[in-house]
Amino acid sequence: MDFTLTTDQSALMSALDRLAKPFEFRPIDFHGFALAGDGLECELDDGGYFDIAQVPELGSLTAAMAVERLAWLPCTVDTALSMLVRPQLPGEWPRPIAVVENGRPGRFVATAKTLILIDGDQVSLARVTPGDVEPAESLFAYPMGRLKRRPAATVLSAEDAASVRTWLRVALAAEATGLLQAAIASAGEHLSVRKQFGRPLGSFQALRHRMAECTVLAGGVRWLALKAAATGDPADAALAALHAQESATRIAYDLHQMLGAMGMTLEHPLHLWTYRLKALVSELGGRGGQALAVARHAFGH
Amino acid sequence: MDFQWDAEQQSFRDTVRAFLAANLPADWEAQAHGPGSESQSAFSKKFCGALAEAGLLVPHWPQRWGGRDADAWTAFILAEEMWAAGEPRGGQYMNVNWIGPVLMRFGSEAQQARYIPPIARGETLWCQGFSEPEAGSDLASLRTRAEKDGGFYRISGQKIWTSYAGHADTCFLLARTAPGKTGMSVFLVPMDTPGITVRQIPSVIGEGDIHEVFFDDVRVPESALLGAEGQAWEIARAALSLERVGIPRFALASRMLRRAVERLRREGRYGHGAVEQSARAHAACEAARLYSYQIVDQRRHGTPTGPEASAARYATVMCERLVGEFVVEHLPEALSGGDPLLLAHHQRAIVAGIASGAAEIQLNLIATELLQLPREPR
């Protein structure tokens, strides 16, 4: 048990910090929902970052840290599925990767080259051909897309399907970790500056305690996500995804309450993280689905 | 970063478990009921004596004081296994966690020679004289006075909610030697000193846990002063930083959650609502576990623990709450004679957010130090 970063992990995170720096601010004229990080995607691809889980010195744990770091950014790219799930798929599948769950619109579906199709208990993989997918307008702050027609798909064995579900949970928790931290930091900045009754909002205990509780929850999500990424254990993954969805549900609500009307505007970036969190909360069967997975894997139910 | 136990850590855990299997009777909690009761106090001395003989009471202490300089993980693995077993060390957990280490850091040679060896042998109990009727979270407003009188101090005042006071040998007492926060001092006071009266306060926690302690012109030699006059705040901070992540409450909460779930499953009562609530509680326990490990890792690397320790404590409070609520809702008969272990855990868990400082104080620290939010005006 050792929570210190290895030299390789530190070096990679420093390199990622440098790479992310130019993308830390959104374009001043962007007042929309889905800010796709095309430039970021090219840089990550050029640097080989999508394959870090396969580097023996780095592995899935470091990939999860990278996903967490990149989820802080206002622009978004499919990092979680590419970095954490793709290495676990049976065979070679091109990225970007997206999930279509029971036919619903999904994140990055319109630009994906590989689709993970979840239909009830069945999980299949498909290569996207032109005309299979289209963009979908959405409140969720990801580039969303939907199926226009169902591509030819390979149905996975029960064992492979279970592994994919495990890594989807890890990916969800890792991405939620970064989103939660970024959203809390964004709200914290507002509370430090915005004054009412003659003093900063952040000096009122009612809000301080609520923010602190959000912070504790988000920190817990981080540790569970990192552990799940390190072990790849189905029970750890289910716990991480459950805690992520539980925490995201509460925190997204709390932060919008604290920002008041400012948080409703597209001028303020909070929605970029909170509405991504809401998308994550809706996935993989939501909190009820994760709870069942926890009961199955941890309590043998 | 590595989430696996290394061979040495795993082997130490196995050693502790083997000791518990051999030395802790299955029904010990029924025999020694109540965390500060007479029976538990007697039991803890017998049990801690055996632990000491096996080298498992203070392995994390320096060799000079009977330890083997083991690292912070060793201390925490030991604490996890003890707490998961219901904490058979009773009030002595406090001795080995922070009273001994604080004496090593701030005590005179005479104080160390007098007080540390009995702790290392597992034969003594301490109580912590901090809270007063008018000084709980606002500890700096305490009123118990210690006035210099030649080579002595005369102590007068009242402490309250003092754990283990009924059977403690010594009190780690905070008293005022001058006005203000810098006028607080620590005294090591034998509980049989004339002028001390202890009254048990009946409580939901169980027999013998909390007390009122009255100091009526109690005369102690100046050698009872720990450190210097006015050093109490520094000493108390050192003690609380060890105490904050000192009790791995998640270990017992997690064990009791599993116990409750297993029974509900056996009886066909583990329905949808119970599944969801138990899964949430389990996630909270594991989050608290990893949070605490982060602090232990900081200790092991000699990094000063910061506001993350407050976050770890609060995460632990939340997991205790969720497990407690789960049992109340889905296995209520446990609190009405149906399961003495779940009952004992529930009673101990009540204090999770209160003992060693209200959890809301931790939230304040997190808001100021982790989130850098502006302070409240005072």
Image (spheres, coloured by chain):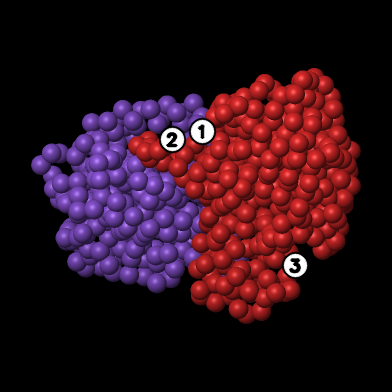
**Residue A208 visible in the current orientation:** yes
Asked if both marks, 1 and 3, belong to the same chain, the answer given is yes
As drawn, is A118 to the left or to the right of B110?
Answer: left
Q: Quadrant of residue B304?
A: top right
Q: Amino acid at mark 1?
A: Gly
**N-terminal-most mark, 2 or 1:** 1
**N-terminal-most mark, 1 or 3:** 1
Q: Which residue is mark 2?
A: B369
Q: CA distance from mark 2 to mark 1?
A: 8 Å
Depth order, front residue of B31/B19: B31
Tell which chain the image draws in purple.
A
* In contact (CB < 8 Å): disc 2 and disc 1: yes
**N-terminal-most mark, 2 or 3:** 3
Depth order, front residue of B133/B88: B133
Residue at the image point whose x is 27% and y is 31% from the top: A21
Percent of width and height locating residue B343: 70, 66
Q: Which mark is residue A112?
A: none
Q: Amino acid at mark 3?
A: Pro
Per the rendering, the colour in which chain B appears is red
Q: Which mark is residue B306?
A: 1
Percent of width and height locating residue B14: 77, 46
Depth order, front residue of B206/A157: B206
Residue at the image point whose x is 71% and y is 37% from the top: B156
